[in-house]
Amino acid sequence: MSKDYYQVLGVEKGASKDEIKKAFYKLAHQYHPDKKTGDEAKFKEVNEAYQVLSDDEKRSRYDQFGSADANAGFSGAGGFGGFDFSGFQQGGFDMGDIFGDIFGGGRRQRTPQGRDIQIDIQMSFAESVYGVTKTTKLRKHATCLTCSGTGAKPGTKSKTCHACGGKGKTVHLQQTILGAIQSQVICRECDGTGKIPEEKCKDCVGEGVVKREEEIVIPIPAGVRDGETLRMSGRGESVPHGVPGDLYITVHVQSHKIWRREGDDLVADLPIRLTEAVLGAQKELQSVKGEMLTIDVPERTAPGTILRMREKGIPGIKRGGKSGDVLIKVAFAIPGKPSKKAKELLKDLEHEGF
Ligand SMILES: [Zn+2]
Ligand SMILES: [Zn+2]
């Protein structure tokens, strides 16, 4: 199933985002199933083309792979083939959304969004099990500390915004397929407050954002897994007059010399000797926290026996209170090559039925 999305929308290959958007509005309007001119299949096709061409990343992938192989390159785009119109109305997509920025009076006005940041954090096995707080320094665009992000020189008065006359909104005329439509948008100069500072903050030139080093405290929850990515909302790059991006933290857990993780259980192997297995023994084992645990190995413990300590494993904070278990797996350790005497004794034992 190869489709030329540009052809579907009737635009040139090098069409601008604006041209693509306009073409989409026009066709979506024309083919909307509620209309007399409606055509559900066409409507879906148009939407599919728009989903790809309006997204920079998907569009460049599509351009690269060409129309025939488009789907092959779309591991992340997914779901186009099984597109279903009924799901589409329930699934948060309705014509109100499409036409929102025409009819909605700037309801969908884009607020600038800061970039996300991704970092890696190393931690010990114990830290991953019980949680830890890490701090890191990031050099990024962040709120200006001099003016606390207001952009005003501290102590300065504010005056009425010249751009909107203090209304906080500006009237915006938009040419659409339905003619010119008037809408109100939030004033960019004053961010809708209607006021601007008399004197701008010197450090950020009135932007409220500067590039600086910021110390970030990262609370790592108990039970985090190696390779897991945590998100701290709003801790990415700040942007003037907008919302900051997010911070993504990928966790790297060092392996432990004794303990390993299986699901939510903490697992260790406990090597015991033949005599200990038969006669029972007290063994010592270092816990994840580094404490010495004394393990009572009962008489006649078979290799492969698992000693279980309920709910002493990965803390269950995230899973409604149920913690994992500690499992100690008993295994035989053969202490080197048996001596002549040991062999004789073992033979005697064999006669005794061991
Ligand atoms: Zn400032
Ligand atoms: Zn204004």
Image (cartoon, rainbow, N blue to C red):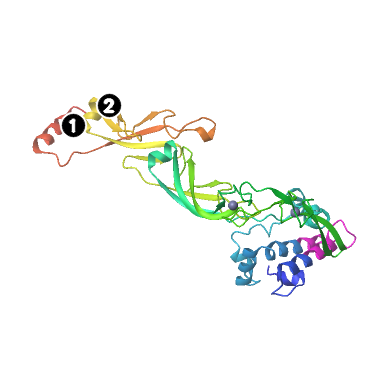
| Residue 208 can be seen, yes or no | yes
Magenta region: 24-44
Give how far apart the Cα atoms at labels 1 and 2 are. Answer: 15 Å
Quadrant containing ligand 2 reads: bottom right
User: Dot 1: within a 10 Å radius of its alpha carbon, few (fewer than 14), some, or many (20 or more) residues?
Assistant: few
Q: Residue at x 68, y 52 (%)?
A: 198
**Magenta span: chief secondary structure:** helix
Return the x and y of residue 114 as percentages of the image width and height. 60, 55
Asked whether, in this view, residue 88 is left or right of residue 231, the answer is right
Amino acid type, residue under disc 2 in the picture = Arg
Amino acid type, residue under disc 1 in the picture = Glu
Return the x and y of residue 57 as percentages of the image width and height. 62, 64
Q: Residue at x 40, y 36 (%)?
A: 266
For the C terminus, the image quarter is top left
**Distance from mark 1 CB to nearest ligand 1 atom below 8 Å:** no
Quarter of the image where one finds residue 73: bottom right
**Residue that numbered label 2 is attached to:** 300
Quarter of the image where one finds residue 264: top left
Return the x and y of residue 131 as percentages of the image width and height. 44, 38
Q: Nearer the viewer, residue 201 or 109?
A: 201
Most extreme residue toward the right, as rendered? Answer: 36
**Residue that numbered label 1 is attached to:** 350
Please tell me whether mark 1 sits on a helix, a strand or a loop.
helix
| Residue 354 can be seen, yes or no | no
For the N terminus, the image quarter is bottom right
Mark toward the viewer: 1 or 2: 2
Q: Residue at x 61, y 47 (%)?
A: 154
